[in-house]
Image (tube, grey):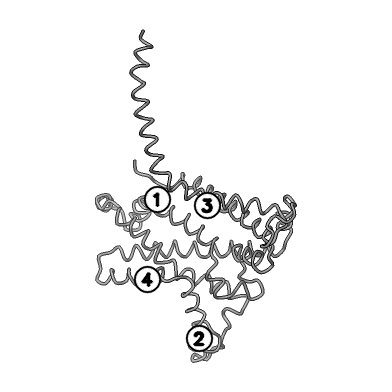
Amino acid sequence: MADRNEIIMIGPKNKTALRESFGSWLFLSPALIAVLLFLILPAGYVAYISLFQSTIVNPTNRYIGLANYGSLLRSASFGNAMIHTIVFAIGVTIVVVSMGLALAVQLDKNLRGTRAFRVIFFLPYVFPLVSSGLAFMWLLQPQYGLLDSLLTRLGLPAVNWLGNVHTALLMVIAVTIWEYLGFYMLIFLGGLQAVDVNIKEAAAVDGATNRTIFWRVVIPSISPSLFFALVISVVQAFQAFDQIYIMTQGGPVTATTTLTYYIYTQGFQFFNMGKASAVAVLLLILLTGLTFLQFLLGKKWVVIDN
């Protein structure tokens, strides 16, 4: 009898929970359908195409299994593109995160003109990377560019910044940093403004120096923002394409060919869609692994207030 009453009591609750769950999924369905149509299905099709020797005209020309992946792993050009991508990602991530945090710390102070500086530093992020790349191409032009004009006036030789294998990748990294720095500054600025002032004042009363307060109070408090910035900056750096296409087109030789530009050359210059799809799959696996690793390591240092 008790079991029957219990079933009678639980039944309406289950129906209510079921209705609420159905309503939640109903509201989420447009976003889920969009994710399915524009992310999951295309990614699955790319993985499928990577198993074929395919062209743009005939994507499923001949099934070759994992031969595209084996060819890539043995390819020196793919290895160079991987190295360039890693160097690019490390250079961009270290600078935008460290300089973005340093700028945010300075602009968080209630000093005169800080609002204007916030706008100035964030403004490059509003510009499309294509226009930024074109502007810097003119600035770095070896004969009439502003930078080389300054060097010649100082009695120094002009440098072909984008045509030199030793400087081309550095220039693309510099333009990317200029573009994204204000975005990460804004992320850290939001985190800094959310830090409890009472905690910092209490630490100062206890005799803590400004450096101690920064490392022991501020950094743990903004660690979620710092973690978010690290994850996003790595993903953005590995997906960089626009600035490379506009400024160097992967050159000189292959000095600025990253994985994304390698996908473009294989797919739309050599029309080898199977190999291009294989690179895209490997890039997805690499980014997924790096993100998962960051989440594992983030559990050890990210402080989340309950």
Residue type (three-letter) at the residue carrying disc 4 = Leu
- Residue 171: give x, y in percent of width and height: 53, 74
Instruction: Tell which tag, 3 or 4, sits nearer the viewer.
Output: 3
Q: CA distance from mark 1 to mark 4?
A: 25 Å
Q: Which label's residue is closer to the chain start, 3 or 4?
A: 3
Residue 4, placed above or below residue 212: above
> Disc 1 vs disc 4: which is toward the camera?
4
Q: Amino acid at mark 3?
A: Leu
Q: From the viewer's perspective, is 272 left or right of 293? A: right
Q: For the residue marked with disc 2, what is the amino acid?
A: Gly
Quadrant of the snapshot with the C terminus:
top left
Is 210 situated left or right of 254 in this image? left
Disc 4: CA contacts within 10 A as few (<14), some (14-19) or many (>=20): some
Q: Earlier in the sequence, mark 1 or mark 4?
A: 4
Position of the N terminus by quadrant: top left
The numbered disc on residue 224 is: 1
Amino acid type, mark 1:
Pro
**First of labels 2, 1 by sequence position:** 2
Residue at the image position 63 percent from the left and 61 percent from the top: 82
Mark 3, residue position: 39
Whole-percent x, y for residue 289 in the image: 57, 49
Check contact, mark 2 vs mark 1: CB within 8 A: no
Q: Nearer the viewer, residue 38 or 170?
A: 38
Instruction: Give SS at disc 4.
Output: helix
User: Which mark is drawn over residue 145?
Assistant: 2
Q: Which mark is residue 93?
A: none
The vertical placement of 206 against 25, above or below, is: below
Helix, strand or loop at label 2? It is loop
Q: Report x, y in % for residue 245.
A: 57, 72
**Residue indicated by mark 4:** 123
The residues tagged by marks 3 and 2 sit, at their Cα atoms, a distance apart of 42 Å
